[in-house]
Image: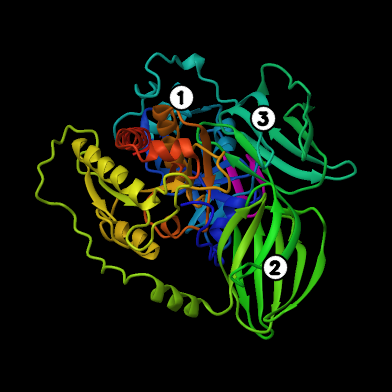
Amino acid sequence: MGKSGLILVFVLSAVLTALLVPSMEVEASFRFYVGSREVDLQESLVVNGNILIPVSVLEHDMGAEVESNLDSGEITIKFPMYTITGKTGTSRVLVNGEEQAMSVAPQLSHGEIMVPLRYIVDLLGLRLNFDPAQAILYVVLTEEMADWIASRYESEPVSLQLPDFLDPDLEFSDVSGIPLLNEVVFLGGSRSRVFIDIQGFPAYKSFLLTNPDRMVIDLTDVDWEEPITEQAIDDPIVKRIRGARFDERTIRLVIELNRATDYQINRWPEGGLEVEFNYQMGDIGYYRDDGQNPRIWFYANEQPVFRVQVLPSPIRLVLDFQNTTLLEGAREIQVGDPPLRAIRISQNSPSVARVVLDLDGPMIPVGVEEIDGRYEIVLFEGTEEEYQAKLALETAEPVELYPVIPTDIEIDDSLPLAHRIITVDPGHGGSDPGTIGNVLGVFEKDVVLPIGLELGRLLEENGAIVVYTRNEDRYVSHFDRAPIANMVNAEVLISIHANSYEGTSAKGVETLYNPLYLENFRFAQTVQTELVSHLGAKDRGVRPRTDLQVLNHTDMPAVLVEVGFVSNPEEEALLNDPDYQVKIAEGLLYGILTFFRNYR
């Protein structure tokens, strides 16, 4: 797809903000067991590292008597030895009449009162463990608790024996419910990532301090085998990492910074916490290119995602760069190039750098390119409707959407993907060539189509029902690709592209995903790992993107895979080789198979 691409990113829902801001809640994603019995967990949250579950689970699966009032938020939870009374919004609760503090306050979500699971487990003297390979969280019961639960329900007995597929050789005495801190690793990269390797689900709090600048993470009720060794880091953002026991319940990690900048914390599906600091944005300017197209340019350590707003009276174009810190501070640039009068730059919030274009007429961003080490946003002088009308004159009319699910095939039910509906999306096509190779002049559309068709053939061999967004060299609008997958109720969508970059040195494979849902990340990580392993290609990692139409509007897990660079002479030749195209398709197949085996 290359560095040039449509980036009309309009304001997203508040749910995305919840994923980006460490202090807010997000949905958890795991299977949950109480003893040997799986619980149908319809709702769960993670708040500052604490897993919250509905009180109805305590009532229906753990033997509690529960009284709750959704209007007042008051709850009473009765176990044989403990009675807990509390209220949503406050972490202070009464246990047998004595005040205690939960690690996080109960919350109301979708008509359910949610309570922190670890607090309940610790109070009852049980154990909580997590199998990261299968994303399974389970409560290990005592004999007394198992007998109590069995006596409360007229159902099959609750066994102390763990399910065999977790670990058939695991003895009860070997299960530890206390999260274990192994090490803290500086991963580096453009966002100076730091990985905190923890087994289990830790509760944590994080905050920034100044004079000197540092970021602090307090891990609650976490053990460690050895204290964290202090690390001196040679990085533009991170200076030093150290850790010590703050009190008997808290391990404090301190990341000393060269400059104050905001951050976000992500939980890895395999366990552990990842800290990502903001993108760093430097100088910003404006010019018109040889085609008289207006362009905003800026320097940054990597291209941040930005959201777009058009405000009337007076007309302003607002670009909000997410997870971005300004290095030069607030300023204003007088332009005087109609319709653009001036550019105002400010740090709108700790996580958002705002660029405001003061206009005399409409203007919208239509593309972004990386040129000579800086990023350039291409602007169109007009409205979105006028730009679409311009595109309609330049490209062929799209084919009407009539996706058909194949029905005339016999499927062996024993095959690993039997009856799974999968949408394969070879990018570009027809009048849209995509990016073009530097040496052989290879068109991206001509590379990704045979890869997609071979992948479809391999998927069908494994029992899948394949629906293509295109199976020939024809134009399909990027607005139509996600709807095709939605119309056929596909279980996953995989979009295949080839990359490009200024110069010839860039190479490797990367996979893009929308970070709104955890399954997108899992799908991207699985496909990236299998494809890189099969090709022996350079691993450029997985990258969150919220500006791609094909990833933003699907009802199922979706990824966009950049299978190589046509701007790199070596990879251009490989991508044009039919044998290598088959090898790419095989790697993508292995990624899909692994995803379904582990997560579906």
The one of 525 and 263 positioned closer to us in this rendering: 525
Give the amino acid at mark 2: Tyr
Query: Does residue 217 appear left or right of residue 115 in this picture?
Result: right
Q: Residues within 10 Å of mark 1 (few under 14, many from 20)?
A: few
Identify the residue shown where x is 36% and y is 64%: 477
Q: CA distance from mark 3 to mark 1?
A: 25 Å
Query: Label 3 belongs to which residue?
Result: 221
Q: Is residue 62 visible?
A: no
Q: What segment carries the magenta color?
A: 83-96
The one of 70 and 67 positioned closer to us in this rendering: 70
Give the amino acid at mark 1: Glu
In this picture the colour scheme is: rainbow
In percent of width and height, residue 501 lies at: 55, 47
In percent of width and height, residue 264 lies at: 66, 46
Q: CA distance from mark 3 to mark 2?
A: 55 Å
Choose top left, top right, bottom left or bottom right for residue 13: bottom right
Say which quadrant the C terminus sits in: top left
Query: Does residue 405 appear left or right of residue 270 in this picture?
Result: left
Query: Label 2 belongs to which residue?
Result: 287
Query: Label 1 belongs to which residue?
Result: 144
